[in-house]
Image (cartoon, rainbow, N blue to C red):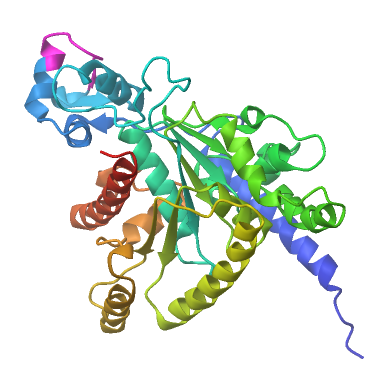
Amino acid sequence: MRRQTRIDQLVGTHAEKLSERLQAHRAQLFPPHARKTLRKFTSGEVAALLGVKDAYLRKLSLDGKGPQPETGAGGRRLYSAEDILALRHFLDGRSKATYLPGRRPAPEGSGRKYDDPLQVITVINFKGGSGKTTTSAHLAQKCALDGYRVLAVDLDPQASLSALHGFQPEFDLLDGGTLYDAIRYVDPVPLREVIQPTYFPSLDIVPGNLDLMEFEHETPRAIMEKDGGTFFTRIGDALAQVQDDYDLVIMDCPPQLGFLTMSALSAATAVLVTVHPQMLDVMSMCQFLLMTSNLLEVVAEAGGDMSYDWLRYVVTRYEPGDGPQNQMVSFMRSLFGEHVLNHTVLKSTAISDAGITKQTLYEVERSQFTRATYDRARESLDSVNGEIEALVQQAWGR
C-alpha cells in the first residue's frame, strides 16, 4: 500500500530548503550584516532628474558650487543620491523653477506645519501578479529621486517590497518590526519604532512579514469584543504620528480585500489600481471592484472617510504588439475614461532581470542591458510616475 506524505511535513521541509537557499543567495549578493547601497548616477542622469542641462551642472562643479561629484575615468562625473538631494536644496530658490516639489510650509499662525496635506497612495488589486509591488517600488524610488520625502509601507505578508529594499523577513525581522506592531489592538508601539531608512536618502520603509496576518486574525475577535469597531482607522491613526515627516506615503497592499486593505483604503488620499490587460485579469478586477464597493460602503456608514483626491487604473506588463491587449486597453479607456492613466508600464526583460538581483530599474546600471531595452522600459516607468506625481501636485492645488 502506497504510503501518503503528510503535507505539513512536506511543506515545512520545502520551506526550510528554500529559506536556506535564499539566505545563501543573499549572502552571495551582499556580505553578512551589510545593507544594500545605491549606485552613482551620471551627470546626464542627474541633469534629466533636475530638469537642467548637463553643461550647467559642469559649470557648477567647475565653480565649486553645490556638492562636488566624483570624477571617474575620462573625466566622467558621478553623483550619489545624497548629492542629487543636496543639489536640489542648493538650486531651490535660485530661480523660478522648483527643485523641491514636496509640501509647502503653512502660513505663520495657522497652527499647522504644512499647507498641503500628506498624500497617501494605496496600490491595490485583488489578483496577484498584476504588478503592485513593481509599481509601488518604482513609484516610491522615483519620487524620492525627484525630491519628495517618501515613506513606503509594505502591507503584504509576502514582503516583496521589503525584499527589494534589502530586508529579508525571516532573517531581519525576527522580533517584529512591521506595521502590525503599530496597529495591533494590545500594546501598539509608536510607528517611528518600525520605520527603517533605505539607501535612498529621501525614502524610508516600514517592512512587512507574516506578522501582518495577525491583524486579519485578531480584528474579528476585537470587533466581537467591541475593541475593533473602528479597525479601519488604525493605519490612518498610525500614519498621523509621522505626517509631518513625509510628503508621500505609498502602501503596497496584499492581493486580497481583508481588514488590512480596508484600513489602508480608509487611510488613503488616493488609490492606484494595477491592471494586467488580459481578459481573466480584468474579470478578476471586476469582482474586486464589486466587493470593494460593497465593503467600503459599510465602512463609510460606520464613519470611515471614503473620499479620495483621485483614483486611477495603471496598465502594467503591457505589450504594445499584442492585439488582444490593445483591445483590452481600449475597452478599459472607453469604460473608465480619464481614470485610466495615459501611460502604461511596459513588459520588459530589463525590469524582470533587475528583479532577479532584487533591484529596480532605478538601481541597475544602464550598461547591464541593451540600451534600447533599458531606455524603453525606463521611459515607460518615468512617464507613469510623472503622471502620478502630476496628480499629487494637482491635489495640492498646483
Give the percent coordinates (x, y) of residue 150: 44, 35
The magenta span reads 60-71
Q: Residue at x 17, y 8 (%)?
A: 64
For this rendering, which residue is in front, 297 or 152?
A: 297
115 versus 225 height, above or below? above
Horizontally, residue 187 falls left or right of residue 359, namely right
Horizontally, residue 124 falls left or right of residue 102, namely right
4 versus 41 height, above or below? below
Give the number of callouts.
Answer: 0
Horizontally, residue 240 falls left or right of residue 151, namely right
Give the percent coordinates (x, y) of residue 268: 51, 48
Give the percent coordinates (x, y) of residue 397: 29, 39
Quarter of the figure with residue 255: bottom right
Extreme residue toward the right, this view: 1
Is residue 293 located in the magenta-colored stretch of the structure? no
Quarter of the figure with residue 294: bottom right
